[in-house]
Image: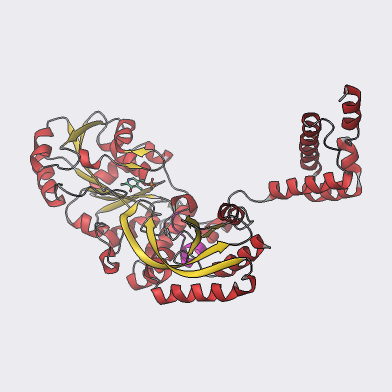
Amino acid sequence: MSNSRLNELLRQLPAVNTVLVSEKGRELSAFYGHDLVAEATGQVLGVWRQRIIAQAGEVEPPSLAFLLKEIESYLISFAMPRLRRVINATGIILHTNLGRAVLSKNAQTAVALAASCYSNLEYDLGKGERGTRYAHVEELLIRLTGAESALVVNNNAAAVLLAMNTLATGKEVVVSRGELVEIGGSFRIPEVLKQGGATLVEVGTTNRTHLYDYQKALNENTGLILKVHTSNYRIIGFTRSVSRHELQKLARANGIPLMEDLGSGSLLDLSAWGFTGEPPVPQVVAEGVDIVTFSGDKLLGGPQAGIIVGKKEYIDAMKANQLTRALRVDKFTLAALEATLREYLRPEEAVRNIPTYRMLAAPLEELREKVEKIMRSLTFIQDKIEVQALTTQSQMGGGSLPGQTIPSWGIGIKFKTITLEEAEKALRQLPVPVIGYIERDTYILDMRTLLPGDDEVVIRSIYEIVS
Ligand SMILES: *Cc1c(COP(=O)(O)O)cnc(C)c1O
């Protein structure tokens, strides 16, 4: 095609200003603001310009009305919040990619209050003077874990880093080779130790570590014995690890603190639900571990936070560390954490009120009923989909209880008018995305991780993507 013909086609595209002064253009500007609409118009026109040049002669320039439609959808998607609600139908309760724990109603209320009002965040109402932000949760943590003292930082990775930096800078930290953990998102024990200024001394082998391995490694430069909970993997077969009791005796005899990075950190005994290998925090404290760290948004079911409990002398040293200021939690975290911890003052309330536990404890009949309800509502589109009730396996997730599953109920869907991949993508890209999973030739929605009201959204979403 000749250059002059191409130029003529390009000239038929309206100028940015022509779009802006049109009736619809003015309407959009009044709603989204002039600058944003001008930017969107420039983007959309740019795409058309490229298209006309690339497919010379094959495409005609669009009408003004068509351009305005494209500009409007650009603006709608720009204005939609990036961080938004999704429906978790994966059956993974603490899904790290989907925000881990959902807060209890009481914790939600506490966050809203902290956001909308002034608070006594760092004001001691008794004395009428400056107070500390940590005081709001310290007493509760002491009461619930049996530890002497407590401190809260931004997340558990920060808790481990702070402990290393405070207690082991320039010193050696002894860790079993079976516990050199990597948690998703690049938390690796050897790297965190290095960052904290400590030197890692690995002892034992991947599958077996003995008390004498630790004994041999100790010297005058040992700062800490560190035990790490293997929260996201399991070593099975010919294995041996050293008990807390033995390590505690060894540490005590040598005047060295014993620390445990517990990771998931439950305040309740999960063996009540048939889970093994997750020692409750109070038990770990009672067994004589001097410093225990765990996450706020794993098995605690609260906000993202790193909780450190243990002997007062060590916690006091951490409080005095300059790094604590850089790792400090904000008022929303403290509000949510305090409210979450209060739930545990009555454990039976915690199980009812904290979504993580409510999901974990949801009886199979209840999940089966949810399946039936959703399936009944989908009978009207039988020509487009085929649905069946399936037994599924839920997981705790978030690097907790590896390899242990919870029987659950799900809905299996086969789509007659679109492919599985198209359906999965369409559901994921709705304004309220629905996240399930594909297993063999079926799209599966697990009922265990649905929150109240989610079933209605799931039904509407399936109607929407097949119509
Ligand atoms: C999850 C986990 C961490 C990291 O905790 P975050 O709160 O995600 O920073 C560290 N150590 C262990 C053993 C863990 O399981």
Give the percent coordinates (x, y) of residue 231. Answer: 30, 50
Of all residues shown, which one is farthest toward the top?
3
**Quadrant of the rendered structure where residue 140 is?**
bottom left
The answer to whether 428 appears left or right of 216 in the picture is right
The answer to whether 376 appears left or right of 19 in the picture is left
Image coloring type:
secondary structure
The answer to whether 21 appears left or right of 84 in the picture is right
Magenta-colored span: 100-109
Give the percent coordinates (x, y) of residue 199. Answer: 24, 30
Task: Tell me the quarter of the image containing the N terminus.
Answer: top right
Q: Is residue 269 visible?
A: no
Q: Identify the residue at image location x=87%, y=48%.
A: 65
Give the percent coordinates (x, y) of residue 3. Answer: 88, 22
In this rendering, the answer to whether 6 lies above or below 262 is: above
In this rendering, the answer to whether 194 lies above or below 430 is: above
Front one among 259 and 114: 259
Magenta run includes residue 208: no
Q: Identify the residue at image location x=39%, y=62%.
A: 394
Front one among 245 and 9: 9
Q: Is residue 95 visible?
A: yes
Q: Identify the residue at image location x=21%, y=38%.
A: 177
User: How many circles with numbers are drawn on the protein?
Assistant: 0
Give the percent coordinates (x, y) of residue 274. Answer: 27, 66
